[in-house]
Amino acid sequence: MRLAPLFSLALIASAATFAPAFAAEYGLTIKNHRFQPAELRVPANTPFTLRVDNADPTPEEFESKSLRVEKVIAGNSSGTFQMRALKPGRYTFFGEFNEATAQGALIAE
Amino acid sequence: MMTTFRTALSTLALLAAASPALAGDASEGAPVFREIETYNLFGFTQGADIGAEGEKELAVTNEAALGKRQGRYQYYSSKIELEYVPTQFMKVAVGARGTYHSIANVPGVDNRESAGFGGLFAEVKYLLIERAPAQPFALSALIEPAWSRIGGEGGRERAFELETKLMGDVELVPNRLYAAANIVYEPEAVRDPGARGYAREATLGFTGALTYRALPSLSLGGEVGLYRAYDSYLFSKYVGQALYVGPTAHVQTSKKTYVSFAWGAQVAGSAHDAPGRLDLDHFPRHRARLKVGVEF
């Protein structure tokens, strides 16, 4: 079974979804297992880069069903996400390792 | 069959009750219903969600097709697949399938008690319309090319099929009530041993499902599916159709694991060249599906 053409098509299609390299960057910080700020405003309908700095010594998994991203960020390090253009609205996210306190939202407007 | 069904539902209820996610919510007062992915909520019907970028999942899907017009017919298939979400709009998967047949005294079918390696498949699912805070509807398209070496009646064959599916779902009540619909078109080229060429077949399906999250980790629902069989790639040689109705259940057993179950009974149908109010020549009397997945 020749799967190479199929995966080539998949890669070409996925390339179209990447945000441009010059997209504006917006940042969040995890400290004491909480997001700062808890609500972050970003422009709607524009791709952007989301940077999450984990200032805690322990790892955290940044996750959002509605944003469709998840990534483990090691302690005292950062993770970046190339975000698609979001429709206006509130997109919740959380830290999976400390879900009771690590809650937040992106407000696309 | 009903005993098996009741056993499966009881097991799922126990899993839900034992789920750490549920226990955590209940201990803090009112249950909290957070966002959930719809992909596995609806049984045989698929939700439109694809997962989160970077997510990897290992899933095992066991399906059973039980009962023909006469005799004993039991066909079990088990698919193991590795899924990956490379972007926020696409999911890909590859996997293999094993089969087990237990057939006796079914007219026109060899008696058989056998297990074997069934074939390989790949899958690409693309999110066409994404859900958003003010837009509860999502739509995805899927193609799944597959190679098969064992047919539904247990004999050796060489088959290539291309399942294509359009999947839409809508969040009727945020984080609680969901509805979904699928359109399935599955052309297949099949060559039996000794045959000179490939026979052309196709299945066209329309399914709908409704699911309610009774608990944060337990979703219950029902689905209906109409399937039509053809001895042609397009729709010129109709040979039969079947209508299935049955319940579905989904248990989020932990943050990274889930179990989903569905069962369907053929309640109406007709075969082109056989009497009766069911089509038991091209479709089984009962079908069941149990999927277990773990994200990592």
Image (spheres, rainbow, N blue to C red):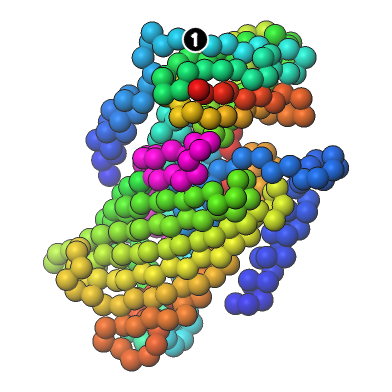
Main SS of the magenta part reads strand
Depth check, front residue: B88 or B111: B88
Q: Is residue B170 above or below residue B14?
A: above
Magenta stretch encompasses residue B129:
yes
Residue range highlighted in magenta: B113-140
Q: What is the x, y in percent for residue B39?
A: 51, 47
Residue B154 in the figure: left or right of residue B81: left
Residue B33 in the figure: left or right of residue A20: right
Magenta stretch encompasses residue B114:
yes
Residue occupying image coordinates x 36% and y 47%: B142
The quadrant holding residue A71 is top right
Depth check, front residue: B292 or B148: B292
Is residue B291 in sight in this rendering? no
Residue B229 in the figure: left or right of residue B232: right
Residue occupying image coordinates x 60% and y 53%: B177
Q: Residues within 10 Å of mark 1 (few under 14, many from 20)?
A: some
Is residue B276 in sight in this rendering? yes
Residue beneath disc 1 = A25
Residue occupying image coordinates x 30% and y 59%: B186
